[in-house]
Image (cartoon, rainbow, N blue to C red):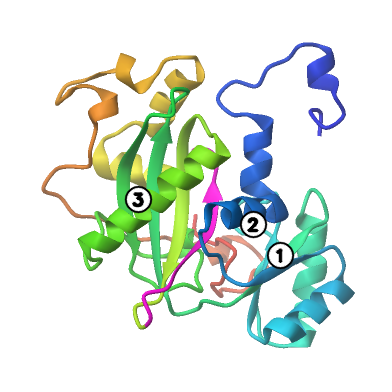
Amino acid sequence: ELAKKGILEKYGVRIIGVDINAIERGEDRIIFKETMNKLGIEMPASKPAFSVEEAEKIAAELGYPVVIRPAYTMGGTGGGHVYNVEELRVIAARGITASLIGQILIEESVQGWEELELEVVRDAKNQMITVCFIENVDAMGVHTGDSYCTAPMLTIAPELQKRLQKYSYDIVEAIQVIGGTNIQFAHDPKTGRVVVIEINPRTSRSSALASKATGFPIALISSMLAGGLTLDEIPYWREGTLDKYEPWGEYVVVKFARWAFEKFEGAADKLGTQMRAV
């Protein structure tokens, strides 16, 4: 908000570690979709809406169920799967209220597809490394924060992992994030179709899982990169410098989410696209 009003520019305040435009390219649903179209990376069919009436028309075109994703929220706040027009009216209104810019995306449902994530770190020289490949054991439809996850990927073909890595590098380069980025994909094993669901152009909760799984301190390295260092200047005990990092090690890490619905009076103990895990 301060950046949009020109206040940061007026006083010469610079945000380290991320470019304001990078946040917009990653979090604004319209700009993100335009960026993916330019890269030729498929997304689920979708249209943005700024009112419940608009949302109803778009959902009727796409066909139910649909997913509602508010712009500029964390943990899926305000969004959800909707199966009919009554649910749509409630969740669309909630999503518009939750969004900083009153914008929601109405998106085709890819429920039941495989959900796959990569953690990528990029520096100011556009050097990129993949810290971790994460496979959600639960299919699409439950927020990744609520899913069982494994690191590394256990049932995904190496060719598909390489394809996801190429897509991830193209996305992170286009968004221009310095530091850690989490990229989430859906894969239909029946047809082989891959779509990008969303990215977190910042250190996220998935980054915390990746850090614990691999021992790679994503938040620390992101801070160093934000301060102006580059990957080829940060020592790495295995290969000399971090620009040569590749995932390694004989390990399987499993994340199991924990919930505490009993602590939140009136909260429905039901999982969906909003994260509920504590």
Quick check: 49 above or below 86? above
Dividing the picture into quadrants, the one containing residue 23 is top right
Give the vertical position of 171 relative to 6 (above or below).
below
- Helix, strand or loop at label 1? It is strand
Q: Quickly name the residue at label 3.
A: 165
User: CB atoms at circles 2 and 1 under 8 Å apart?
Assistant: yes
- The numbered dot on residue 72 is none
Q: Neighbour class for label 2 at 10 Å: few (<14), some, many (≥20)?
A: many
Q: Residue, x 60% and y 64% (percent of image)? A: 274
From the top left corner, tell me how far across and down residue 95 is, in percent: 76, 63
Type of amino acid under label 3? Gln
Q: Please name the residue shown 27% across and 45% down the image.
A: 213
* Viewer-nearest of discs 3 and 1: 3
Disc number placed over residue 105 in the picture, else none: 1
User: Residue 103, relative to residue 200: is it above or below?
Assistant: below
Residue 194, image x and y in percent?
43, 68
Label 2 with label 3: CB-CB less than 8 Å: no
Picture quarter with the N terminus: top right
Q: Nearer the viewer, residue 242 or 70?
A: 242
